[in-house]
Amino acid sequence: MRIDIISAVPSLLESPFNDSILKRAKEKKLVDIKIHNLRDYSNNKQKSIDDYAFGGGAGMVLGIEPFSKCIEDLKGKRDYDEIIFMTPDGENLQQSYANQLSLKKNIIILCGHYKGIDQRIRDYLITKEISIGDYVLSGGELPAAVLCDSIIRLIPGVLNNETSALTDSFQDDLLAPPVYTRPAKFKSWEVPEILISGDLKAIEKWREEKAMENTKKRRPNLTKNKKD
Ligand code: ADE
């Protein structure tokens, strides 16, 4: 899978892809992430990418030309399945959408600034608008990193134990059950006995029950379509 991210502040995207699971995914060549500096597509000597808003108003607006040029360059080289704009008024990111995206070949992600991006970019250049939650961040870079993480960990071969992505919270509209590790007793706090019983069937059943219990308690909206 190839992901192209277009950003006015590319340095914000350096660290998330250079550690842990995402770094390993890149090293294993399961994902190719290219970060493009919007300024490199500016059409003037000053490398400016924003301008005053037509009609007045506070704040600068990221213009359409650099985004359009960068997207055209990329589309000239390969076909893209989706061109996504990160924005707080987009569709809320759901696990099911991350699952769908993890099967795609090439995607572009645009990072903008809330209130600060020419509307024509949204009207004519993109295919999807995604929000990572009902709060406003300073730009789309951190949301883009969140979206990429949610996708990349699902690509087969990225996680050592492939089943661990399948048992993530939300994969089947259930939160994950609790997990424990050694020591079995810390102070007076003990691990549930069933987990050290060796009875795999009973452990599986306990995990299912705990997942349902957790979901009902914390996220009852997810269990609407489930029976006990
Ligand atoms: N840009 C700023 N805030 C955002 C959010 N919550 N989700 C996606 N993109 C954003």
Image (tube, grey):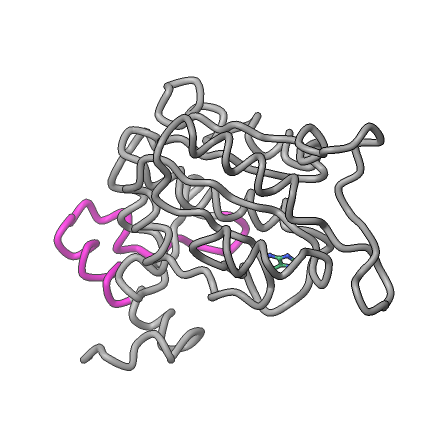
* Residue 147, horizontal then vertical, whole percent: 49, 48
Q: Is 7 covered by the magenta stretch?
A: no
Q: Which of 178 and 80 is in front in this view?
A: 80
Provide residue 181's location: percent of width, then percent of height.
Answer: 41, 42
Q: In this view of the protein, which residue sits in the foreground, 76 or 135?
A: 76
Kindly identify the residue that appears in the image at 29 percent across and 70 percent down.
212
Left or right of 120: which side holds 153? left
Q: Which of 201 and 86 is in front in this view?
A: 86
Give the image location of residue 59, x and y in percent: 84, 59
For the magenta stretch, what is the residue range? Answer: 186-209
Q: Does the magenta stretch include residue 187?
A: yes
| Pick the front one: 196 or 127 | 127
Residue 201 left/right relative to 87: left
- Picture layout, residue 206 above or below residue 67: below
Q: Based on the displayed image, in which of its 4 quarters is residue 122 positioned?
A: bottom right
Tally of marks: 0
Name which residue lies at 19% across and 45% down.
198
User: Where, quadrant-wise, is the N terminus in this rendering?
Assistant: top left
The picture quadrant where one finds residue 66 is top right
The residue positioned farthest toward the left in the image shown: 201
Q: Position of residue 216 (x, y in %)?
A: 36, 77
Ligand 1 rendered quadrant: bottom right
| Figure quadrant of residue 160 | top left
Q: In this view, does 39 lie to the left or right of 133?
A: right
59 above or below 12?
A: below
Q: Tell me the quadrant of the picture where the C terminus can be found.
A: bottom left
Q: Which residue is drawn at 58% across and 50% down?
A: 143
